[in-house]
Image: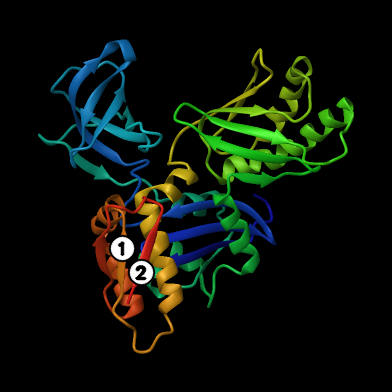
Amino acid sequence: MAGVSEIRIAWSPGEARIAVMQNDQLEDYALWRPGKPDGYGDLHLVRVTAAASAMGGAFVTLADGAEGFLTGEHQPGDLIRARITRSPQGGKGLRLKPVKGEVSGQEPTLLAQGPTSLEALAERYPQADILVDSPALTAKLSPALRPRLRRVPKAFDDTTASLCDALADSAADLSHGLRATITPTPALTAIDLDDPSPDRRPQTAQFSANQAAFPALAREIRLRNLSGAIVVDPAGVSPRKRPALVPALRAALEGDPMRPQALGATALGLLEIVRTRGRPPLHELLRSPHGTGLNALRQILSQYASAMPPPALTLQAAIPVIRALEEDSSALAAFADAYGKPLQLALNPNYPTDYWTVTS
């Protein structure tokens, strides 16, 4: 964290893209969506609906009707103070752990919200200035952060924007000529390391290249918030030699706040990593119906912001995308404030969830 100078926040309707920059190096990245918080760290009073002793916990209901899994032994009907330790992700629901304290109340309720992703990064980098490019965002920030704010015309320069946009790609260039292809699945995330060089390196050189590429790989894992089970297929190293790569991978993962562990190598030579699940991974946020809708708002505003007078616009998108935007009324209100007119929404059941159009 030494030397990190800036937390840059690019605001668009419903979403803050947060990049921690050290010179031209992207050190950390997160999304904050105030209209649909991820709930991570929230403190709740929950009701136990069913015990699941064989699974080491119980199923519970929260105040908004959401369901989750609570660790520990509990009985149906119990009211328990609990904190969310994993947001919904990967098709799995909330996970909570009990928190000591007096239980007051008769029904499930939200007792306190956890830190936002911005507040978490601001705490992680306490000496960094916070650059914002929107007065609308400034009003949403915690008063504790305001002494660190600097208003700028544009929070993301071309370099920052390019580095952040690259995180949406399934492939990433590492050091020493290696390339990673990242494939999330419901059970795990598979990372294939490849050497696209036309000149085949000897085994010793391939081994060294993998070792040298691990710090860049660890950065990609952190920036994309890949979590849970992760397996890495090294490039050009025979399976019997791959266990010797584990110490270098373990060293590269040090310093990650989610404390990933390199567990070893499988019989097939795949390197195993486990990284604690907390907030949803970046690929889920970007590819979700809500993410598609917010991306549409940002692109539409960029395309039509200079039109005078602003024409009436209609966004057509798949049913899940429209529903997600309707549930995020603050994003639609922010678009109307920035654009000067509200955006009309139209369902198109024939559209895939990653496709949308706008008409005037």
In the image, residue 135 above or below residue 92: below
The amino acid sitting under disc 2 is: Val
- Residue lying furthest bottom in this view? 308
Q: Quick check: can you spot residue 2? A: yes
Q: Residue at x 22, y 43 (%)?
A: 110
Q: Residue at x 54, y 69 (%)?
A: 155
Provide the residue designation for mark 1.
316
Provide residue 174's location: percent of width, then percent of height. 72, 44
Provide residue 348's location: percent of width, then percent of height. 27, 57
Q: Nearer the viewer, residue 102 or 21?
A: 21
The amino acid sitting under disc 1 is: Gln
- Left or right of 23 on screen, residue 276: left
Query: Which numbered disc flags the more N-terminal residue, 2 or 1?
Result: 1
Quarter occupied by residue 244: top right
Label 1 neighbour load within 10 Å: few <14, some 14-19, many 20+: many
Q: Residue at x 75, y 28 (%)?
A: 248
In the image, residue 294 above or below residue 176: below
Q: Could you say whether the residue bearing mark 2 is in a helix, strand or loop? A: strand
Quarter occupied by residue 81: top left
- Residue lying furthest left in this view? 106
Query: What quarter of the picture does the C terminus occupy?
Result: bottom left
Provide the residue designation for mark 2.
358
Q: Nearer the viewer, residue 45 or 291?
A: 291
Q: Which numbered circle lies on residue 259?
A: none
Provide residue 215's location: percent of width, then percent of height. 71, 39
> Mark 1 and mark 2 in contact (Cβ < 8 Å)?
yes
Q: CA distance from mark 2 to mark 1?
A: 6 Å
Q: Could you say whether the residue bearing mark 1 is in a helix, strand or loop? A: strand
